């Protein structure tokens, strides 16, 4: 992925609102050196994922915090969340942490 800078440690990508997991699947398959985590309100992932992929459900994006360490991810993708996020300011702060 061109969005990530080269580093000596294994990098992690978070897909917020992963839905069926297609983005997680494609990124993990194309980049076996990345760990990809998808979170969503519902488990809609239809089948097997690459070994470097983990889907965590249910996660309510509107909770005060998410079950991840601060600065755990190198890249966070937010797509299609227009009906799911109640407070965008709070959501962006959680992503930044």
Image: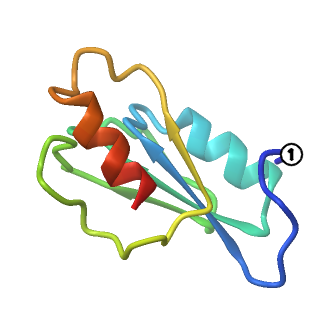
Residue drawn at point x = 33 percent, y = 70 percent: 68
Residue drawn at point x = 79 percent, y = 69 percent: 33
Image quarter of residue 4: bottom right
**Viewer-side residue, 14 vs 74:** 74
Residue drawn at point x = 24 percent, y = 60 percent: 66
Residue drawn at point x = 39 percent, y = 73 percent: 70
Q: Can the viewer see residue 43?
A: no
| Image quadrant where one finds the C terminus | bottom left
Left or right, 33 with respect to 14, comes to: right
95 to 70, vertically: above or below: above
Q: Residues within 10 Å of mark 1 (few under 14, many from 20)?
A: few
Q: Position of residue 83 (x, y in %)?
A: 23, 15
**Viewer-side residue, 11 vs 93:** 93
**Viewer-side residue, 46 vs 84:** 84
13 to 42, vertically: above or below: below
Q: Position of residue 91 (x, y in %)?
A: 29, 40
Image quarter of residue 20: top left
Count of all numbered marks drawn on residues in the image: 1
Image quarter of residue 32: bottom right
Read off the residue under disc 1: 2
85 to 94, vertically: above or below: above
Left or right, 63 with respect to 75, comes to: left
């Amino acid at each position: 992925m061109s969005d990530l800078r080269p580093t000596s440690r294994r990098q992690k990508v978070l897909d917020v609102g992963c839905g069926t997991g297609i983005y997680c699947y494609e990124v993990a398959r194309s980049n076996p050196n990345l760990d990809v985590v998808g979170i969503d309100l519902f488990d809609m992932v239809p089948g097997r994922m690459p070994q470097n992929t983990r889907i965590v459900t249910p996660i309510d994006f509107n909770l005060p915090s998410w079950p991840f360490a601060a600065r755990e991810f190198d890249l966070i993708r937010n797509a299609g969340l227009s009906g799911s996020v109640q407070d965008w300011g709070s959501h962006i702060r959680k992503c930044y942490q």
